[in-house]
Structures are given as C-alpha cells and as structure tokens.
Amino acid sequence: MAEEKKRYAVVTGANKGIGFGTVKQLASNGVTVVLTARDKKRGLEAVDKLKEFGLSDLVVFHQLDVTDPSSITSLADFVKTQFGKLDILVYLEI
Ligand SMILES: NC(=O)c1ccc[n+]([C@@H]2O[C@H](COP(=O)([O-])OP(=O)(O)OC[C@H]3O[C@@H](n4cnc5c(N)ncnc54)[C@H](OP(=O)(O)O)[C@@H]3O)[C@@H](O)[C@H]2O)c1
C-alpha cells in the first residue's frame, strides 16, 4: 500500500475483550494497529494470537496504562516516530 494511504490506529486495553476484537477488525481492514496493554506479557501474547489469522504483520505492541502519564507520553512518542500520524484512536473507558 502506498505510504500516504496507510492508516494507523491505537487501541487501548487490547489484550482481551472488546479491545482485542477491535484490533482484529481494524487489522482485517488493512489498518496498521498499535495493540496496547498495561502488561507487556499479556500484550505480546495477544499479538501472538493474531498470528493465527495472518494479521500479525499489521499489529505492533506497545505498553500503555491509560492512568500513567509517562506511559501515555511514551506511546505518543512511539507513534510520532514510527508513523508520523495517527488516524484512529480507540479509547475504551475502563
Ligand atoms: N463486554 C461488553 O459487552 C460491554 C458492553 C458495554 C460496555 N463495555 C465496557 O467496555 C469496556 C471494555 O469491556 P471488555 O468486555 O472488553 O472488558 P475486559 O475484557 O475486562 O477488558 C478490559 C481491558 O482493559 C484493560 N485495562 C484495564 N485497566 C487499564 C488501564 N489502566 N490502562 C490500559 N488498559 C487497561 C484490561 O487490561 P488487563 O488485562 O491488564 O486488566 C483489558 O485489556 C469496559 O469499560 C466495559 O464496561 C463492555
């Protein structure tokens, strides 16, 4: 896909439940998704699960605890550095 047409998303609380399902749907539609979770092990296991669906190339993990400002800053820096933009933010109220 041409670089300018690529779309990028961040999903919070994405190691399970609605967040995980949302990552799967977005990646199935060609969106590059940052699967975030507060626990690195649970997040990476969730990315592994998406390998079964052939989606792991479109999904990257980054740690995020939405209650921790330093974690939010770290994610924002990651998105800016890696993608230079963010098209979709899925923030699930906890
Ligand atoms: N399921 C439904 O039918 C439904 C319907 C309407 C509304 N909702 C609401 O939608 C939200 C998600 O529901 P769900 O069923 O997907 O819940 P879930 O399966 O319990 O998943 C919640 C997710 O949020 C994460 N999380 C918790 N605290 C966090 C924090 N501080 N920073 C980042 N992530 C955090 C959890 O991570 P850990 O694994 O680390 O705990 C988990 O990945 C909830 O607020 C729920 O009340 C759900």
Image (cartoon, rainbow, N blue to C red):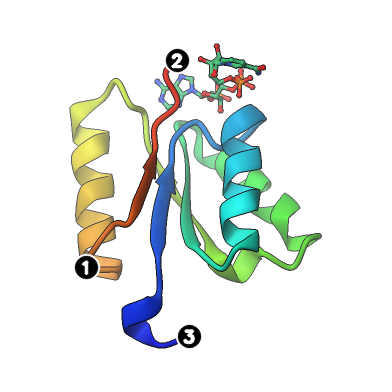
Q: Amino acid at mark 1?
A: Gly
Q: What percent of the width, then of the height, locates residue 93?
A: 42, 19
- Picture residue at 67% right of the left edge, 64% below the top: 55
- Picture residue at 48% right of the left edge, 85% below the top: 1
Identify the mark nearer the N-term, 3 or 1: 3
Residue annotated with mark 2: 94
Horizontal relation, residue 52 to residue 12: left or right = right
Q: Residues within 10 Å of mark 3 (few under 14, many from 20)?
A: few
Residue annotated with mark 3: 1
Q: Nearer the viewer, mark 3 or mark 1?
A: 3
Asked if residue 57 is positioned above or below residue 87 in the image, the reply reads: below
Q: CA distance from mark 2 to mark 1?
A: 28 Å
Identify the mark nearer the N-term, 3 or 2: 3
Q: Residues within 10 Å of mark 1 (few under 14, many from 20)?
A: few
Horizontal relation, residue 66 to residue 92: left or right = left
Q: Where on the picture, by quarter, is residue 73?
A: top left
Q: Where on the picture, by quarter, is residue 87?
A: bottom left
- Disc 2 CB within 8 Å of nearest ligand 1 atom: yes
Asked if residue 47 is positioned above or below residue 83 in the image, the reply reads: above
Residue annotated with mark 1: 84
Q: What percent of the width, then of the height, locates residue 89?
A: 36, 43
Judge whether residue 43 can be spotted in this image.
yes
Q: Are marks 2 and 1 in contact (CB under 8 Å)?
A: no
Q: Residue furthest right?
A: 52
Q: Nearer the viewer, residue 7 or 46?
A: 7
Looking at the rendering, the quadrant in which ligand 1 lies is top right
Identify the mark nearer the N-term, 2 or 1: 1
Q: Amino acid at mark 2?
A: Ile
Q: CA distance from mark 3 to mark 1?
A: 16 Å
Q: CA distance from mark 3 to mark 2?
A: 34 Å
